[in-house]
Every structure is written in structure tokens, then in C-alpha cells.
Amino acid sequence: MPFVLDGATGTALMAAGMPNGACPEKWILEHPEKLEAIQRGYYAAGSDAVLAPTFGGNRPSLERNGLYDCVERNVELAKLSRGLGGGFVGGDLSPTGQFLRPYGDAAFDEIVAIYAEQAAAIEPYVDFFISETNISLAEARAAVVGIKSVSDKPVFVTLTVDKNGRTMSGDDMLCALLTLAELGISAFGANCSVGPGDLLETLRPLAPYAAGLGVALIAKPNAGMPHDTPQGRVFDLDAESFGEYVPQFLEAGIYVIGGCCGTDAGYIKQIREAVDSFALSAELPQKDSSKLICNAKQIAEIDPDRLPEPLAADDEIFDCEDEFAVVRVESESDAEFLLENAAMLTAPIALTGDSDCCAKVIREYCGKIIYRE
């Protein structure tokens, strides 16, 4: 059954009077009627769900704006959407602006804790969570781990991609789907950055894998590409032109659809009409991904019952020239070595060895791993 999300929040708030450069999480609580009018409009246009205005509500993002009341502010923001009573409410979470080691100074557990704090604050007021506009699969993983540490509610994840279908960090979308499906997400896809045509081409090849994994696909594209004019920023596609893509998303098996920058209630009305007139003609083809492993950028197919001789978790793993490596992890120091160097490995890995030490690697590793004792 297709599910209709809402349209833009940021550009809609700016159209409603929010100054350019203002902190939305501050401005909204000073002008709650503006947010409520936007979201009532989305429900009236046909959205099954709106996203609570908690996008930039994680602690680091708030503190960069001089706000030090993370939990309290998130509660008040989530209550605004919950109080409308129009339908489902999603808890919206953004990137933190920090980078995980080795590309930055943040440790995995630090990022997990940031997301857990925000998710716990809004959990009573939302029906599901969505971690969106992610530019890094590594941080998206941390977000999912954090959310799931405090809630059993469904988790959606969307990355933002370029015209080539990769994130700013170079992450491959199939790798991201395989990685996050291992964590038990309910829906996966992309939002922002590009218009519906480019997003359709990025997501279409994922549909058989998503169907096999039982993960719904999400498309939340911009209203085309933005252009700055003397009258302000405008986007390529009007609502009717945007709506022409919706049947193509549905036919491709992409059933969770909304709009991002530049879209408003008129765009959501077009999505609703297309969804209501759509009839599923056949079951989607499915691909089995059980024998696939990956890091953030590469995929390999293996036979879990016939693995090659494992390599030690030391410098010899850098000499591996195969499509994947099997690594033996027997100690905490092995696990730490592998995690510290995982980003520099040229191929995906499978693990064998001590179950507890391997579990530590699997928890933090940015990819999908198969473990055999």
C-alpha cells in the first residue's frame, strides 16, 4: 500500500516569513501557527504523515545556534505536530554536522548517544522515525543504532545523492540498503539534492533487492533543481510536472513518496491523486541478497559455507587483492585494529573467530558482514 509523506518544511517556512539563516527549531516555537498551518495543509492535500519539525534538533546542531535545551525543545516541537491530529507523525532527524573517525574526531558511540538522546525525547509523540538528508552512510548507521536503542518504532532512512546516485561521501546506494537492512530499518531511499527524474533512476535498480529484504523504498525529491532569481529561489518543476513522475515511481516499486525542497501542498495533492488511481498489476521481482557482503562502496558475493582461508587482523589484510577478505578476529585488540583501519580496506570483509569480538566489529563496521565461527 503506497504511503504519502509531506512536502518541504524549510522552504515552506521561508515562504511563511522565516528569515533566511534563522534557526528553524527556534523560529517555529516563536511562530507555532506558521508550522501548524503548513502541516494542516499537507494533511488536507493527502499526506498520510507529516514530519515533526525536529530535523535540526540534535544537541550539536542546536548548540551551534546557541540553544542548550535539547530534550525540552524537541518535546515542544514534536508536540506541535502530534497536536494536529491529522494522521501519522514522523520524528525527523538530521545529520549532526560531525564526522566519524577516521574522517573526523567523533567516535561511533558518541554519535549513537546524540541520536539516542533526541529519539528518546520525541519517541512518545511520533509513530515512526526518519533519519534524512544523510551525506554519509556511516553516520546514518549510527543514527539507526541510536534510535533503536531507545525505541521499537519503525525507522526510515534517506540519503541525499548526486546525479550519479552516490552520497557526498561516495557511498553506493545498494551498499547502503544492504547495510541498513541488517539493522532492521523499515524503509530506505533518498531525499533532496535532485529532482524526481534523477531520483527515479537512482532508486529503480534497488527495488528487487528492497523487495527481497522486505524494506519499502522512499522517494522525497526536490521540485527539480533550484535557481536564484531577483524574485527569490525558484525550482524547475511545478506541481503538475512533478506529479507526472509519481506513476513511474509507483510502477518501479517505490511506494513511500513525498516532496523535499520547493514542494508544497499542491505537490502533495498531485502525489495523492496518482497514488489513489494506482493499481498494482503484479508482484515486484525479488533478488536474494543473503550472500552479498559490502563496505560503503563495494559489494562482493560469497558462499558463506565455503570461505577461503582467513587472514589475521594485522597488516596482512592490506595485501589482499581478492574481491573480499575473510578476517580472523580473536581478541579485543584484533577488533580495534580492524575498526581503526576498516575505512582503508579495499574490499568488503567476512569475519570468523571469537563471537564477542566479532560482534563489536559488526556493530561499528560501515557495511554488511557475514560471520562464521
Image: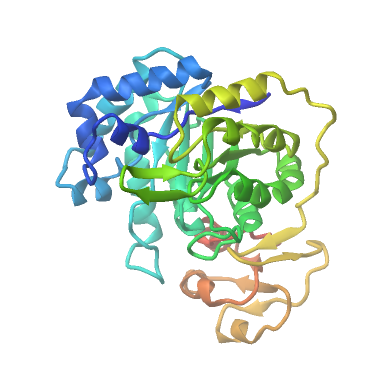
Whether residue 34 is situated above or below residue 317 in the rendered picture: above
> Foreground: 17 or 304?
17
- Judging from the image, the colouring scheme is rainbow
Q: Quadrant of residue 213?
A: top right
**Residue 182, visible in the rendered structure:** no
Q: Quadrant of residue 234?
A: top left
Looking at the image, residue 227 sits to the left or right of residue 219; the answer is: left
Whether residue 290 is situated above or below residue 152 in the rendered picture: below
Whether residue 134 is situated above or below residue 51 in the rendered picture: below
> Foreground: 338 or 120?
120
For the point 31% across and 47% down, the residue is 230
Q: Residue furthest front?
A: 230
**Residue 366, visible in the rendered structure:** yes
Place of residue 53 in the rendered image (x, y in percent of width and height, measured from the top left): 34, 32
- Indicate the quadrant containing the C terminus: top left, top right, bottom left or bottom right: bottom right
Looking at the image, residue 337 sits to the left or right of residue 105; the answer is: right
Whether residue 237 is situated above or below residue 179 in the rendered picture: above
Place of residue 29 in the rendered image (x, y in percent of width and height, measured from the top left): 21, 28
> Foreground: 301 or 45?
45
Place of residue 144 in the rendered image (x, y in percent of width and height, measured from the top left): 48, 45
For the point 67% across and 18% down, the residue is 276
For the point 85% across and 30% down, the residue is 282
Place of residue 128 in the rendered image (x, y in percent of width and height, measured from the top left): 48, 29
- Indicate the quadrant containing the N terminus: top left, top right, bottom left or bottom right: top right
